[in-house]
Amino acid sequence: MKIAILPGDGIGTEIVAEALKALACLDLKFEMEEAKVGGAAYEAHGHPLPEHTLKLAKEADAVLFGAVGDWKYDKLDRPLRPEQAILGLRKNLELFANFRPAICYEELTHASSLKPEIVAGLDILIIRELTGDIYFGQPRGRRSSPDGAFKGADEAFDTMRYSRPEIERIAHVAFQAARKRNKKVLSVDKANVLETFQFWRDVVTEVHAQYPDVELEHMYVDNAAMQLVKQPKRLDVIVTGNMFGDILSDEAAMLTGSIGMLPSASLNAKNQGLYEPSHGSAPDIAGKGIANPLATILSAAMMLRFSLNQEGAAQRIEAAVKAVLAKGLRTADIYSAGTTKVGTKEMGDAVVAHL
Amino acid sequence: MKIAILPGDGIGTEIVAEALKALACLDLKFEMEEAKVGGAAYEAHGHPLPEHTLKLAKEADAVLFGAVGDWKYDKLDRPLRPEQAILGLRKNLELFANFRPAICYEELTHASSLKPEIVAGLDILIIRELTGDIYFGQPRGRRSSPDGAFKGADEAFDTMRYSRPEIERIAHVAFQAARKRNKKVLSVDKANVLETFQFWRDVVTEVHAQYPDVELEHMYVDNAAMQLVKQPKRLDVIVTGNMFGDILSDEAAMLTGSIGMLPSASLNAKNQGLYEPSHGSAPDIAGKGIANPLATILSAAMMLRFSLNQEGAAQRIEAAVKAVLAKGLRTADIYSAGTTKVGTKEMGDAVVAHL
Ligand SMILES: CC(C)[C@H](C(=O)O)[C@@H](O)C(=O)O
Ligand SMILES: CC(C)[C@H](C(=O)O)[C@@H](O)C(=O)O
């Protein structure tokens, strides 16, 4: 079991260190190698995703990823910015299936900006397509406008694209995931406006014929953004494209009020995967020892489940996280009166103690 | 003052009728003509936006629009579906500036799924560009994939595009609107991924130089979707493109819990405008006499303000709406214990009584 460790920038190093401590408690042997990525890699090697980092990730069974990004890289040319590393990893490893759970932990219900009765027990799984759509579609660029009312003016453009096999494979992933849950898939599109997403709707409907036991509903993305706010608990599995998935998965994560708790997995057809917390690199609190390591620890659990085939170990980690929450331990982001505020290391230590 | 009245489908006829009653109370002379649009126009004339409807709208100073759409038209070819009427009106009248306020009325704070302290007093103005972006960009369609990993497979595609003048004019609208409010503009983009929205960010920043008294912040759309849930009251004016604006304006509307109260305006460079409620045609409750007419009545107020230059009359209508709310009158969508439930007509009558 080969794991590439890519801590990245900001709080990345701190939170990944805690996940490694948890992994070390398990009776499992991993081959691990660490490399720089994002801004850290740019500073050391002049590129956010250096050749050797990409090679390491490709040869591993799984990548444990911290976070990338910092305001100080905002002025760099786009190909050199930290987030290009994550886009490059997704594309090069063909990590087309992104799993983003939005779970509201019982003890943390109060942390949500939504009323407790709206989010208590929330458990949504967003499955976002991750290697297609307008994120990667060619052509894209700047030019003199070739037509229309502003012909000749400067303009910029991008291409949204989805091919049948791309839609089919993510639809299969969604229906199969729904089978292990409440057997309901909501496919989110904008079929009333976009050719790409009318095609998406058509292909998802076709694939659905192979899953008669799963219920399929279609919804426009604007309506989905509303339903997430209005009655999120009605939702089970949501499948959507790369762009809409980016927006809706963050909206859903924030509904829980505890994005510091939410892991994510990005998988390819061989179950190779990249595992990272749903939150970002939080440069404002980096180095202070106060970041919440639980999303990263739970990402390690997803890694054990999906890429390393160690369901038992995954469950042990998840149980340990639940136990430290039940004990009342909280990092600053999820702290509330009556609980015990701890730092990154103490939180990691508590998980280790429970393992 | 020439007004084109386009009630459309579903509850459209009922709610527009109440707005017309309110307009009739004012000491103003309007020239009004009604025409069919959407599904109603398709049934009567075979097209959702018949020539004569479009001509009427073009020749009017303002269009008062109800809503379009019904499940029963979902199977029609896209060019014949009701929503094509609204896209056609936007494009043909060049209604590039969409104003979508998200206001949480004091009396209705409880209707929100968010905690009262998060939304009480909320007052956001979303300014959505409405005639560009991936909604109208050419080329678009289906084809055999010309390149990439799935070359030769069926695919669908769309083009996202923005030209400099399109971005400039909507940026001016946003900065000018902010001057009448809290002087803060949040421009939402996805500059870290899309060429179109890096250009958007660049041009908005340039235009900002002409508005040194207004504060400008940039935010990625995924983060904006989160901040709307987390701390919406921090936001003032949001300006964004057509696609992101579609999603964020609906999300913001739903935060208030009372989308039945929210009007919208879509303006062109000559201040011709289309005015419609932010909610849809609600075919499930059409004809039952229970729809909330207040969003449409408030849209008529926006029409008086923006296209007909009747600020006084606009304020009279807005005051009347506040008065009926203060009196405790509620349609079903905003009803809560201790208030008086009324139907569409009674609500309209109450507004009229206050005028
Ligand atoms: C950093 C950025 C390119 C990325 C995305 O848009 O996919 C991020 O927002 C995410 O969701 O992982
Ligand atoms: C009906 C549809 C085409 C339209 C849009 O996407 O713009 C609607 O959602 C809106 O926001 O007015």
Image (cartoon, coloured by chain):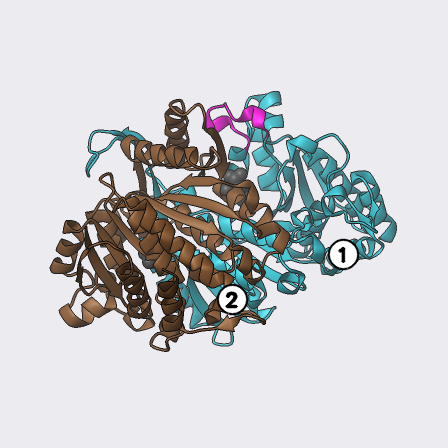
Chain colours: A brown, B cyan
From which residue to which does the magenta span run?
A: B70-82
| Nearer-the-camera pick, A144 or B354 | B354
Residue topped by disc 1: B313
Can you tell which quarter of the image residue A148 is in?
top left
Answer with the quadrant where ligand 1 appears in the image. Answer: bottom left
Residue positioned 42% across, 33% down in the render? A179
Which marked residue is nearer to the observer: mark 2 or mark 1?
Answer: 2
Protein chain holding label 2: A
Q: Element type at marker 2?
A: loop
- Per the model, the C-alpha gap separating discs 2 and 1 is 57 Å
Q: Amino acid at mark 1?
A: Ala
User: Would residue B71 be counted in the magenta stretch?
Assistant: yes
User: Would residue A227 be counted in the magenta stretch?
Assistant: no
| Nearer-the-camera pick, B180 or B222 | B222
Q: How many marks?
A: 2
Protein chain holding label 1: B
Q: Element type at marker 1?
A: helix
Residue topped by disc 2: A328
